[in-house]
Image: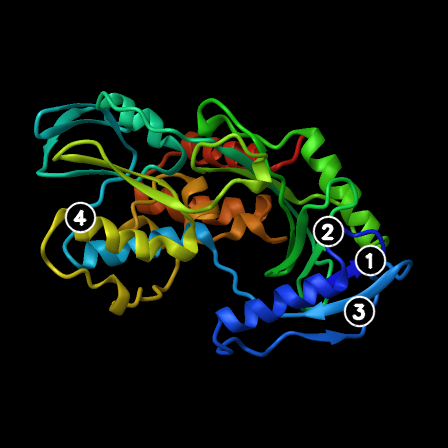
Amino acid sequence: LLPVYDGDVRPLWQIRLGMTLYDLLARYRNTARHKLVPPPAGLRQDGLRGVVQFYDSQVNDARFCVDNLRHAADLGAVCANYCEVTGFRTGAAKVRDAISNVECEIPARFFVNAAGPWVPQLAELAGQRVPLSPTKGVHLLLPRVTAGHGIFFQARSDGRLLFVLPWGDCSLVGTTDTDFSGDPTTARVEPADVDYLLRELRWILPDAPTDIITTFAGVRALLGNNRAPSARTREHRIVRHNDHFLSIVGGKYTTYRLIAQQVVDQLTHRPCRTGTTPIPAYPVSVETACREEMALTLDDVMWRRTGWALSQAGGREKAEEVAEIMARELGWDNDRTAAEVARYLKGRTWHS
């Protein structure tokens, strides 16, 4: 649902025009066309000009990444986890296993730098420069706010579009869009980010619960330019540095298969099959994650294999249950098991 109020940056007629274009771009193959609907319970009524209903999709991004990796392995790719590229020499990449600390070299005819927000750092190891203007996005996980629908709304303070989305037994509230510099692994949710999102949420849904279950932050790998963070393009560029090395700069989930096809077309004369090859959905269990998906830490399973961290059931009891199974699978002793639980709970807890 997209409610429109007096004073919004985008008036109702403009929103409806945009939704009509949205329907046309989908070639009317979406679940249904947009329409005006009565406001749901709990939505602010003061100044409300109308509520537009439309349909969109959502994805568990971490699980989606793992499914792509498993499919690649099924098709013959060799996948490595917890490995860091430390440099390049002619025809080979230098790699360090972060678990065993063993170093080796991996020879290849081509190297594709698809490291997202880490693209500039990896390119620099090859003596290349890549322009990037990354931004940080923050999400809050709250108890379920809406009955069964999402809400996109225009922020009072800056006119940006924010969202409240159903996520299992919870709701995701997001997202910020602020400049970011430095190592993407250091991206954190700051009190100012939380204050901004909760302030806007309380305006649109005055009675919404605001007890934060957990938070997470990510870095968008956006093409370099001087525009404001939320106005930067989500387009991509493939930078061919030399005959053996290229970088993918920018892009987003909805175009990742197009990007893959363009890369394959540049590097080989074989036809790319990504447009006709579906990604299988794999069953998920703790045992499967350990045996077939290279899960080595409790965080791997709770955040990146199952998504249990982003649910109301993802607290200590679930963490200890999963850790016990992983201990049997991976041979952890009691100290290691307890340390994994403590680290996970610390990372999941929001500290203001």
Mark 4 lies on a secondary structure that is: helix
The mark lying in front, picked from 3 and 2, is 2
Give, as a three-letter code, the residue at label 1.
Answer: Tyr
Q: Which residue is mark 1?
A: 5
Mark 3 lies on a secondary structure that is: loop
Mark 2 lies on a secondary structure that is: strand
Q: Residues within 10 Å of mark 3 (few under 14, many from 20)?
A: some
**Residue at 72%, 67% in the rendered image:** 147
| 85 relative position to 342: left or right | left
| 49 relative position to 220: left or right | right
Q: CA distance from mark 4 to mark 3?
A: 50 Å
Can you say whether 111 is above or below 152 in the image? above
The C terminus, quarter of image: top right
Can you say whether 232 is above or below 18 in the image? above
Which of pointers 4 and 1 lies earlier in the amino acid sequence? 1
Q: Which residue is mark 3?
A: 40
Kindly check if marks 1 and 3 are in contact, taking CB atoms under 8 A apart as contact: no
